[in-house]
Image (spheres, rainbow, N blue to C red):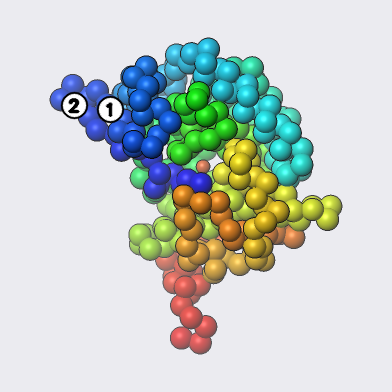
Amino acid sequence: MFEEAQYFAPVVADADGNLTVQLGKGHPGFSDPVYRERRDRLATLASRWTPGEPCPTADYTEAEHEVWRVVCEALRVKHEKYASRVFLEGKDRLGLPTDRVPQLEEVSDLLAPLTGFRYQPAAGLVPLREFYGSLADKHFWSTQYIRHHSVPLYTPEPDVLHEVVGHGNCLAEDRFATLYRAAGEAARRVESEAALEFVSRVFWFSLEFGVLREGGEVRTYGAGLLSSFGEIQQIEQATLRPLDVARMGVQDYDITHYQPLLFCGDSFDQVEDVIGGFFATADDDAVAALVRPAGV
Ligand SMILES: [Fe+2]
């Protein structure tokens, strides 16, 4: 129910470069000064990180490790029923710990030998072109905080569970890694903001919220669904449309509700052909041709 470019809490810096994360009043951690202090500290650490350095270490509390345990177990059950085979293969390969929150550096060390991807810490919103473009270099910008422990199965923003359980397990699989890199190359190739937005929507409706048919069932390969205990089962109620890049790139979505409309591939092979094919060739002219009404 969120999107990298739109749902981060604003972050402001003081004169010394210390960041404050401005949680909204409805955020589960809003009234928890300990949680807020840690959010601010993690954001500040990330903002001081420079490329090539290890990701800063997050001092997760026992309550936060418990959140990780609860969510991993809840999602394990959901993944058996709703996750696509290719995701489950990535999950097996990566072998994330389920009893504690892993550090981003640990995740990088598990991923790099598999597909070459590494994580890098985001203090808050990463601009679209930077976020997606970095995928071309096998770099994944990631938040480091975890959702508030009072509601472990809910988060209003993309936290480390989304970034690592959702995206990390995908990035461990070569077929996903190729798609993510192609998306990054597309984001770098397009020049107009409109074309970049189009690419990001295709990413949203595929690598975040995509579904496919497998063995007579609908399963998901999208990190947004794969990391959401509440939303993953909604794929049974969603209206499914065939893969159609021209439509996906202009389809609106509401980040505050479960996605009522999802795009469904016949197989992961088809996802690679259609979505990967688009990313491989997308430029401003190609996007403009897709947006232009037929016959114009
Ligand atoms: Fe995401």
Q: Is residue 81 above or below residue 191?
A: above
Q: Is residue 276 above or below residue 16?
A: below
Q: Quick one: SS at disc 1? A: strand
Q: Which residue is mark 2?
A: 14
Q: Quadrant of residue 39?
A: top left
Q: Position of residue 206 (x, y in %)?
A: 59, 54
Q: Is residue 251 left or right of residue 6?
A: right
Q: Is residue 202 above or below residue 58?
A: below
The disc placed on residue 248 is: none
Marks counted in the figure total: 2
Q: Amino acid at mark 1?
A: Thr
Q: Amino acid at mark 2?
A: Asp
The tag earlier along the polypeptide, 2 or 1, is 2
For the point 46% across and 47% down, the residue is 3
Q: Quick one: SS at disc 2? A: loop
Q: Is residue 272 above or below residue 143?
A: below
Q: Position of residue 52 (x, y in %)?
A: 41, 25
Mark 1 crowd level (few <14, some 14–19, many ≥20, 10 Å Cα): many
Residue lying at the far left in this picture: please name it.
Answer: 15
Mark 2 crowd level (few <14, some 14–19, many ≥20, 10 Å Cα): few
Labels 2 and 1 touching (C-beta < 8 A): yes
Q: Which residue is mark 1?
A: 20
For the point 49% across and 42% down, the residue is 135
